[in-house]
Amino acid sequence: MATPSTHPADAAPKAAQRFAGKTVLVTGGGTGIGRAIALAFAAEGAQVAVAGRRAEPLKETVAEIEAAGGRAAAFTADVTSGEEVARLVGRTVERFGALDVAVNNVGALMHPAPTADISEDDWRFALDTNLTGTFLSMKYEIAHMRAHGGGAIVNIASNLGASLRRPGMSAYIASKAAVSALTRNAALDHIKDGVRINAVSPGKVDTPMSSLPGETPEAKAERMRREVPAQRAARPAEIAAAVLYLASEDAAFTVGTELVVDGGVTA
């Protein structure tokens, strides 16, 4: 009977370990893209802190990471509060001893409305969550990183913003375009401190946020074939892959870049 080959070429490929020994903080890490990002970092050796407003989804992310043999912790925090973000960074460092990478993924999509019909409350909520939340997160992440040898930050913007406009989306688009501009300027401010800052701007991703009310999976797939040159929505793991690239040493000379991942929509 033949013995199985043990030649290295026949072995199952192992996941890269670009983040072994690193601590990563992912805001909005309980669901969707944020969860995929947290899982991807953990699979490459990072210890991961996930944060958000709701405890239960965060616990589910942590449980999934731990079931695969990784290390993770969940912290509830509202990124629109500077006090809570400062506490979040402090708790992450207290738990894991460092903060090497941060991914600012918290975001909110408003109900579509023409500009003149957007309520002032909805406008403020979009700006507070998408823009101010990103600013406050960076403020406290950078403060720690520049005092401890540097790090990498990836903000999640959107192809709706600096790259693409759409009727009825003014609040969201204005907030995400501002995230793109903020990312670039912060990158210039802090590269001298050893902190690299970039952004990933997803298009349509296969999460509940990209579904229309009452839309079936079949109808959604057909709509994606019509609307996206790649003829489908992105998988959350594909957005995570872009984030991990920008956070890694593979992108050591990449500063202030916005990487659009949208299947060709804004090509």
Image: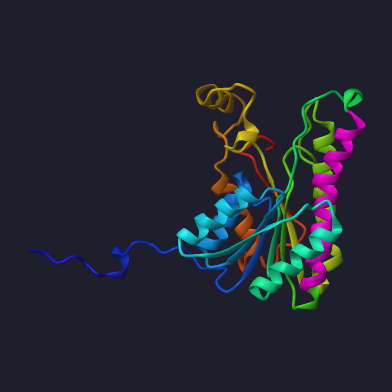
What is the magenta segment's predominant secondary structure? Answer: helix
Residue in the picture at 79% in, 32% down: 165
Instruction: Say which of 248 and 216 sits in front.
Output: 216
Residue in the picture at 85% in, 23% down: 114
Q: Position of residue 151 (x, y in %)?
A: 72, 70
Instruction: Say which of 166 and 114 sits in front.
Output: 114
Number of labels in the image equals: 0
Instruction: Say which of 197 and 119 sits in front.
Output: 119
Give the side of residue 101 with respect to residue 183, left or right: left
Residue 46 occupies quadrant: bottom right
Q: Does residue 185 show up?
A: no
Q: Position of residue 21 (x, y in %)?
A: 57, 74
Vertical comparison of 115 with 236: above or below: above
Q: Does residue 190 show up?
A: yes
Farthest-out residue, front: 56
- The quadrant in which the N terminus is found is bottom left
Give the side of residue 50 with respect to residue 39, left or right: right
Give the side of residue 261 with respect to residue 159, left or right: left
Q: Which residues are magenta?
A: 119-145
Q: How is the image coloured?
A: rainbow
- The quadrant in which the C terminus is found is top right
Vertical comparison of 121 with 199: above or below: above
Inspect the magenta stretch and tell me whether residue 179 lies in it: no
Give the side of residue 43 with respect to residue 134, left or right: left
Q: Position of residue 255 (x, y in %)?
A: 75, 62
Farthest-out residue, left: 1
Q: Position of residue 237 (x, y in %)?
A: 54, 48
Inspect the magenta stretch and tell me whether residue 134 lies in it: yes
Vertical comparison of 185 with 6: above or below: above
